Amino acid sequence: MPSVLDNAMSLVCRTADFLDFQRRFHGLEIVERLRVPDKVIMFRATVQLDEGGVRVYQCYRIQHSDILGCYKGGIRFHPDVDLDEVKALALWMSLKTSLVGIPYGGAKGGITVDPKTLSVTELERLVRKYTSRLVNDIGPNIDIPAPDMGTGAREMAWIYDEYRKYRDVARGVVTGKPVALGGSLGRKEATGRGVVCAMLEAVNDLGLQDYRVAVQGFGNVGSHAALDLFERGIKVVAVSDITGAVCNPGGLNIPAMIKHRDRTGGIYGFADAQPIAMEELIAFDCEVLLPCAKENALTADNAGAVRAKLVAEGANGPTTPEADAILVKNGVLVVPDILANAGGVIVSYFEWVQNREGFYWEEADVNQRLFIRLKSAYARVRDFSTQRKISLREAAYCLALEKIVQAMVDRGVQ
Ligand code: NAD
């Protein structure tokens, strides 16, 4: 089975052909420059356990490209993290920041760990170890980490605090921090809100009315998207997470579900809903599907069963190329990850700007600026896809890559 990096690169190669890079930039090895990251950092972190003994963890930071600005990207804590996955995630960050027009390149970090197997103190030691090893590679003008799966404001606070032991106090060294430490209002909710914003643009294009939504994944992205939908009066009829899946054709009570998850650790056992099999979520009877969990949620095996007319990708890489082709053939509109989930990095950029200015914005300002950027990126992608008769994903890759490659050439290609 191809890795997520193979999947990401296959579309980069197809886009390079479509945009005729080989002829236009003959001899400049554009695709190789995109395939091979600027810098790959891999190291071991050994953590002392509370009860004595140690555990050893594999850590990564991949700096894919700083062509358009300093490196930027989240840190993932998950047992499946490996080199290929982090490389793919870093490449997608470069594409995402280019597409939505923020002055960053792309990076990603990760540790192969299930954070649930560590106590809070052990986790803190791991995060501090990770940070201290990266102190020469990150910084507010070098590479700026942020949350991803398995990490959040708490971990960003530890990174910020550890970094300041070695360097000047620099709030902009990480984004997604707690508000008290210079985090932006609206950052925590930004990715989910952005998914809904992009989804609403597509709903409008399709002319959908009285539609129902199913959400896969109920972590940062999925739960904030579901809550935003609930607050807008849009029915969320099915939700899944790693603990199970539930549905309520009349609409789930999302605030109550969030309370249940916070109390119990997952959505399993949520009252006022019927349990369904995890696999049923993808094929659930609804008009809109939001995959907000992990890569490869939609594959050749299940994409044909999707009943939704619209898929907006909250997760990174949730659709394999084979599944994408099936969805396109079946007339399902897909809003690709590098557009649909860009709300997080957009508000991370706002956080960094606020840290530099020392002037903090109201949440309404943050949201308004987020929606303006996302809507304009969506319109550019939609218009390009219409003009060139290609999918939204292909159009998004074209716009993102054209800008990166032009900047590469403008800077001199050594
Ligand atoms: P998270 O760790 O907060 O939540 C992940 C959720 O997915 C959890 O509810 C987990 O139970 C669920 N999940 C895991 N495996 C599942 C499965 N097989 N079936 C159903 N649910 C499953 O992570 P997150 O920050 O919400 O990130 C989710 C996705 O969004 C990732 O692909 C991440 O890269 C992407 N993303 C996150 C951000 C951000 O700001 N956090 C920004 C852009 C993209």
Image (cartoon, rainbow, N blue to C red):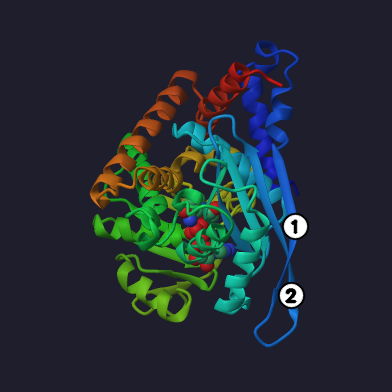
Q: Secondary structure at mark 2?
A: strand
Counting residues from the start of the chain, the first of labels 1 and 2 encountered is 1
Q: Position of residue 356 (x, y in %)?
A: 39, 43
Does 215 appear above or below 97?
below
Kindly identify the amino acid type of the residue bearing the numbered disc 1. Answer: Phe
**Can you see residue 281?**
no
Count all numbered tags in the image, as a single digit.
2
Packing grade of label 2 (10 A; few <14, some 14-19, many >=20) is few
Q: From the image, which quarter does the C terminus lie in?
A: top right
- Which residue lies at the image location 58% right of the left edge and 47% below the top edge? 317
**Can you see residue 17?**
yes
Q: Position of residue 29 (x, y in %)?
A: 74, 22
Packing grade of label 1 (10 A; few <14, some 14-19, many >=20) is some
Instruction: State yes or no: Cβ of the residue under disc 2 lies below 8 Å from any atom of ligand 1.
Output: no
Q: Secondary structure at mark 1?
A: strand
- Which residue lies at the image location 30% right of the left edge and 40% below the top edge? 369
Kindly identify the amino acid type of the residue bearing the numbered disc 2. Answer: Arg
Q: Are marks 1 and 2 in contact (CB under 8 Å)?
A: no
Q: Position of residue 180 (x, y in %)?
A: 35, 62
Cα gap from disc 1 to disc 2, whole angstroms: 14 Å
Which residue is the site of mark 1?
43
Q: Is residue 133 left or right of residue 257?
A: right
The part of the image, by quadrant, that contains residue 114 is bottom right
Which residue is the site of mark 2?
55
- Which residue lies at the image location 50% right of the left edge and 59% below the top edge? 160
Q: Position of residue 413 (x, y in %)?
A: 68, 20
